[in-house]
Image: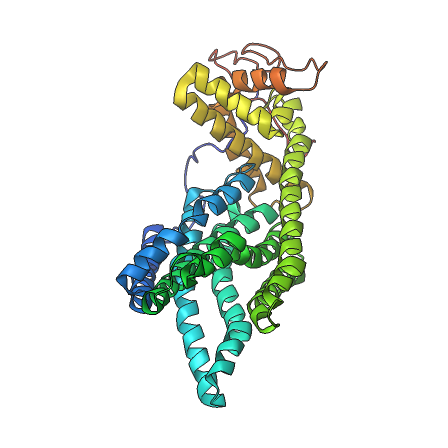
C-alpha cells in the first residue's frame, strides 16, 4: 500500500493534557485590525484638516492633483520588485496608509513643535527653520516611516523574508509619506502664487513641482529603503545572531537619517549646493541602490532554481518546474497559457501556484541554514499541500512554458500522470496519493 500523505491529520482522541486557554478580547485579530484601521483613519482625518488649513481648499485640491502624479510610477516599480514572491496586498495598503497618514501626522506635529522651540530658545527664527529641516526633520520623519517597517517585521513575519521585502515595504511607506508632504508643499506654493500673482514657469508652484515631482520623486523612498534593507538583512539572519538582528536595522535607520539630513541641508550649501548634492550624491546613491535591489531580486530567482529540484526529485514537482519558476519570463508564459486554456480561474491558480512554490523555495533555503524556525516542517507541508491542490491546472502550463522558454536541447519537460511510478495510486481507494518527501534527506 502506498505511504499515506505526510500531512497533519485531524487529532483524534483526548486532548492529551492540552490546557485550553481562551483568547482575550484584545488578542482577537478582528479587534487588532479594527484598532489599527481606526488609528489610521483618525490620523488621515487629522492630517487632512491640518493640510487643508495651511493650504486652503483650492490649494489643497491643486496640491492633491499634482502630488498624485508620481505615485503610480513608484508603486509600479515596487510591485515589479516584489513579483518574485508577491507580498499580501494588505501589507502594501497598510504601509502606504501609515506613511500618508500616521507618519505624516507625526512629522508635521513634531517638526512644528521642534522648530518653534528652537526659535524660542535661540531667538532666531531663520536659524530655527534651517536647523529643524537639517537635524530634526530627518530624525523624526525617518523614525516615523521606519515604524511601519518594524510593525510588518514583527507582526507579519511570515511575509517578511529578505531584502526585497524590506525594500518594498519601506519604499511604499515612503511613497505614501511623500504623497502627503507634496500636497502640503505644492498647495502652499499655489497659495503663494495666488497672493503674489505668479504664473507660468516663473511661478513657485511650477518650481516646486519640478524639484519635488520631476527631479526627486524618489528622494523619500531612497532614504527609507536603507532602513528596509537593514530589516531585510535581519529577516534572513539566524535567530542566534541577536546582535546582528538589532544592529543592522538601527544602522540602516541611521544611514537613512544621514542621507535625509544631507539632502535637506543642500539648500544651505550655497547657490548651487542643491544641484551639487543632487548630481554628486543623490543620483549615484539612487543608481547604487537600484542595482542592489535588482541584484537581490535576481538572487531570489536563483534561490528558487537551486532549492526546488529537491522537491522535483521527490515527485512533488515536475522536472521543468524549478527552471520555469526561477524565470520571470517563463512564469508569464505559464500564466498566459493557463488564461488561454482555462480562463481567469486557471490564470489565478497558476499565479497562486508560483507564489506558493517560491515561498517553499525560500523556506527550504532558510531551513538548510538553520533559520527555518520551529514550525519548519508544518509550514513546508502546508505549502506542499497548496501546490498539490493546484497541480492539475498548473502542471500543463509549467510544461508548456518549459518547452517554449527553456534552454535548447533540454529534454526534461515531460511530466508524469496519475498511476505512474512518480504518482502511485492507492491500492485501497484507487485515488492518487501524495509523493513522500523527507525534508532531511535532500
In the image, residue 362 sits, relative to residue 319, either above or below, namely: below
Tell me if 44 is positioned left or right of 88 in this view.
Answer: left
Given residues 84 and 151, the one toward you in this image is 84
The quadrant holding residue 98 is bottom left
Above or below, comparing residue 6 to residue 270 in the picture: above
Please, is residue 354 above or below residue 189 in the view? above
Q: Residue at x 55, y 9 (%)?
A: 419
Which quadrant is the N terminus positioned in?
top right
Q: In x, y percent, where is residue 147?
A: 48, 61
Is 387 or 108 nearer to us in this picture? Answer: 108
In this orientation, does residue 24 appear?
Answer: no
x 62%, y 72%: residue: 269
For the C terminus, which image quadrant?
top right
Observer-nearest residue: 393 or 212? 212
Q: Is residue 19 above or below residue 340?
A: below
**Residue at the extreme right:** 409
Left or right of 310 in this view: 374: left
Q: Quadrant of residue 342?
A: top left
Q: Position of residue 78 (x, y in %)?
A: 52, 44
Q: Quadrant of residue 37?
A: bottom left
**Residue 156: image location, x then y, percent:** 48, 50
Amino acid at each position: 500500500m502506498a505511504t499515506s500523505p505526510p500531512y497533519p491529520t485531524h487529532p483524534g482522541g483526548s486532548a492529551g493534557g492540552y490546557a485550553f486557554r481562551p483568547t482575550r478580547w484584545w488578542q482577537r485579530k478582528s479587534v487588532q485590525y479594527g484598532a489599527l484601521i481606526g488609528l489610521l483613519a483618525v490620523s488621515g482625518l487629522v492630517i487632512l484638516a491640518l493640510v487643508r488649513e495651511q493650504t486652503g481648499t483650492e490649494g489643497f485640491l491643486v496640491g492633491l492633483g499634482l502630488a498624485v502624479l508620481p505615485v503610480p510610477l513608484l508603486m509600479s516599480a515596487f510591485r515589479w520588485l516584489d513579483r518574485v514572491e508577491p507580498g499580501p496586498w494588505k501589507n502594501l495598503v497598510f504601509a502606504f496608509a501609515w506613511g500618508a497618514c500616521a507618519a505624516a501626522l507625526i512629522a508635521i506635529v513634531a517638526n512644528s513643535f521642534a522648530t518653534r522651540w528652537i526659535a524660542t530658545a535661540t531667538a532666531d527664527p531663520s536659524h530655527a527653520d534651517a536647523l529643524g529641516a537639517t537635524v530634526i526633520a530627518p530624525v523624526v520623519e525617518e523614525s516615523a516611516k521606519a515604524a511601519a517597517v518594524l510593525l510588518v517585521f514583527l507582526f507579519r513575519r511570515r511575509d517578511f523574508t529578505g531584502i526585497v521585502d524590506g525594500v518594498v515595504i519601506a519604499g511604499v511607506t515612503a511613497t505614501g509619506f511623500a504623497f502627503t508632504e507634496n500636497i502640503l508643499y505644492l498647495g502652499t506654493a499655489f497659495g503663494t502664487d495666488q497672493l503674489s500673482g505668479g504664473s507660468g514657469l516663473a511661478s513657485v508652484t511650477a518650481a516646486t513641482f519640478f524639484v519635488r515631482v520631476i527631479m526627486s520623486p524618489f528622494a523619500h523612498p531612497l532614504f527609507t529603503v536603507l532602513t528596509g534593507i537593514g530589516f531585510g538583512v535581519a529577516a534572513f539572519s539566524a535567530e542566534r545572531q541577536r546582535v546582528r538582528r538589532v544592529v543592522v536595522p538601527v544602522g540602516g535607520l541611521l544611514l537613512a537619517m544621514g542621507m535625509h539630513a544631507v539632502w535637506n541641508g543642500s539648500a544651505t550649501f550655497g547657490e548651487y549646493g542643491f544641484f551639487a548634492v543632487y548630481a554628486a550624491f543623490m543620483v549615484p546613491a539612487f543608481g547604487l541602490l537600484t542595482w542592489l535591489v535588482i541584484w537581490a531580486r535576481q538572487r531570489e530567482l536563483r534561490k528558487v532554481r537551486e532549492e526546488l529540484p529537491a522537491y522535483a526529485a521527490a515527485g512533488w514537482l515536475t522536472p521543468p518546474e524549478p527552471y520555469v519558476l526561477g524565470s520571470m519570463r517563463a512564469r508569464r508564459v505559464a500564466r498566459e497559457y493557463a488564461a488561454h486554456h482555462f480562463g481567469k480561474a486557471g490564470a489565478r491558480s497558476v499565479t497562486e501556484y508560483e507564489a506558493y512554490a517560491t515561498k517553499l523555495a525560500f523556506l527550504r533555503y532558510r531551513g538548510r541554514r538553520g533559520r527555518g524556525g520551529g514550525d519548519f516542517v508544518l509550514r513546508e507541508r502546508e505549502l506542499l499541500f497548496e501546490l498539490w491542490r493546484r497541480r492539475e491546472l498548473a502542471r500543463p502550463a509549467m510544461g508548456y512554458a518549459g518547452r517554449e522558454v527553456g534552454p535548447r536541447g533540454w529534454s526534461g519537460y515531460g511530466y508524469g500522470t496519475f498511476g505512474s511510478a512518480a504518482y502511485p495510486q492507492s491500492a485501497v481507494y484507487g485515488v492518487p496519493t501524495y509523493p513522500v518527501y523527507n525534508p532531511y534527506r535532500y
